[in-house]
Structures are given as C-alpha cells and as structure tokens.
Amino acid sequence: MENLRLSPLINESQIQKRILEIAKELDRDFKGEELIVVCVLKGSFMYYADLIRALNLDVKCEFYGLSSYGDSTKSSGQVRMTLDINASIEGKNVLVVEDIVDTGLTMKYLLTNLESRKPKKIKTTALLFKPEAVKEKCHIDYVGFEVGNEFVVGYGLDFQGYYRNLPYIASVQNMN
Ligand code: 5GP
C-alpha cells in the first residue's frame, strides 16, 4: 500500500444522524406508496443498507453496478454498466442511492438510463456531494453532506479497493 494519510471528515454518529433525517423526509414524501430503492454498486452499499433500514415504507431492493474510476482517484469520464437491475420500474416510484456525486457524470448516465424505462417518479440521494467538482448538472433530491474537492474514502467508498469497511468518512492524502 502507498504512503497515505487519512484525515477523518465525518464520523459515524454524524452519518447515522443524517441518515435518520433523510429517511424521515423520504417517509413523508412517499407516504402510503411503494418505493423501489436502487443501490448503485459498489460504493453506496453501506449507505444503502443503513438508509433502507431507517425507512418506514414498503421497499423493494434493486442493485445497479457502475464503474467510472477504475483504480484511479480521477474519474475516467466513461461510465460502464457492470450489472443491471432485475425488475421493471415502469410506473413505479424509484429512489437511486449513490455514495458520492463528483462530476455528476455517473448520476446523469443513471438517470438517462432509468428514465427511459418510464418510472412514475425518480428521486435521487447521495450521501456525499462535491459542489465544486460538478460538470454535468444533475439534481440530487436528498444530499447527506457536501464535501470539498478532495478524494474521500470509508463507509463504502474505496481507494484501490481498500477502506470500504471504515465506519466513517476520511479524506486521503498521498504522502509520497
Ligand atoms: P462522478 O461520475 O460524479 O464523477 O463520480 C461518481 C462515482 O465516482 C461515485 O459513485 C464514486 O464511486 C466515485 N467517486 C467520486 N468521487 C470519489 C471520491 O472522492 N472517493 C471515492 N472513493 N470515490 C469517488
């Protein structure tokens, strides 16, 4: 492993508190309705698992695999689907759950793809949002936290496959 320094940014209890707030908003916005919640793999799996457990709605779980970073800390600019959802979303309410929105390319790709399947309504949530990095305008309905234009890991987010298991979010500096 390279010589990296991790600086904690958002701790476990801040994450859990914010997730409960977002779940409350979703419960209110989708009251009495069914929701298909789409986990965007791999990075959002931890946020997704905590968020769906905090929801008081009829939820169906779907998984969508996308890749745009490879092993780099810079987006390749090309989004590749690695796994499609398994169910029809036509006429259904859909919530897309992302770990982080950086350039916005991935979210734009996702929304274009899922909207073509004619859902009733699509909403988006991202645990983290980097407002300074956005290139593709995309609206995120429920944002966990805004972060600066730095590379972050933990709570599902990786660097070269590592650090996904950290229960908190940290920024990464290369000390070489
Ligand atoms: P975007 O297409 O918005 O540039 O990037 C979206 C995807 O890139 C995210 O779903 C995430 O997987 C990855 N990504 C963007 N910024 C970061 C970051 O700071 N840390 C990590 N680990 N992944 C990131």
Image (cartoon, rainbow, N blue to C red):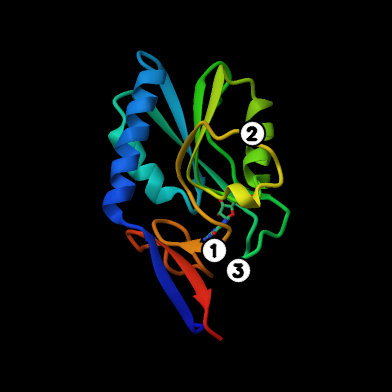
Q: CA distance from mark 1 to mark 2?
A: 24 Å
Residue corresponding to mark 2: 111
On whether ligand 1 comes within 8 Å of the CB at mark 1, the answer is yes
The kind of residue on which mark 1 rests is Phe
On whether ligand 1 comes within 8 Å of the CB at mark 2, the answer is no
- Within 10 Å of disc 3 (Cα), the crowding (few <14, some 14-19, many 20+) is few
Q: Residue at 65% x, 63% y: name it.
A: 74
Q: Considering only order in the chain, which callout, 2 or 3, is on the residue closer to the N terminus?
A: 3
- Residue 96 x/y as whole percent: 51, 35
* Label 2: element kind: helix
Q: Considering only order in the chain, which callout, 2 or 1, is on the residue closer to the N terminus?
A: 2
Question: Could you say which quadrant of the image residue 57 lies in?
Answer: top left
Q: Residue at 39% x, 56% y: name it.
A: 155
**Mark in front: 1 vs 2:** 1
* Label 3: element kind: loop
Q: Residue at 59% x, 41% y: name it.
A: 84
Can residue 13 be seen in the rendering of this structure?
Answer: yes
- Within 10 Å of disc 1 (Cα), the crowding (few <14, some 14-19, many 20+) is some
**Mark in front: 1 vs 3:** 1
Would you say the residues marked 1 and 2 are in contact, meaning their CB atoms lie under 8 Å apart? no
- Direction from residue 144 to residue 73 in the image, left or right: right
Question: Could you say which quadrant of the image residue 8 lies in?
Answer: bottom left
The kind of residue on which mark 3 rests is Asp
Q: Residue at 64% x, 36% y: name it.
A: 138
With respect to residue 129, does 117 lie above or below? above
- Residue 103 x/y as whole percent: 66, 50
Residue corresponding to mark 3: 71
* Label 1: element kind: loop
- Direction from residue 173 to residue 53 in the image, left or right: left
Foreground residue among 106 and 7? 7
Residue 151: mark in rendering: 1
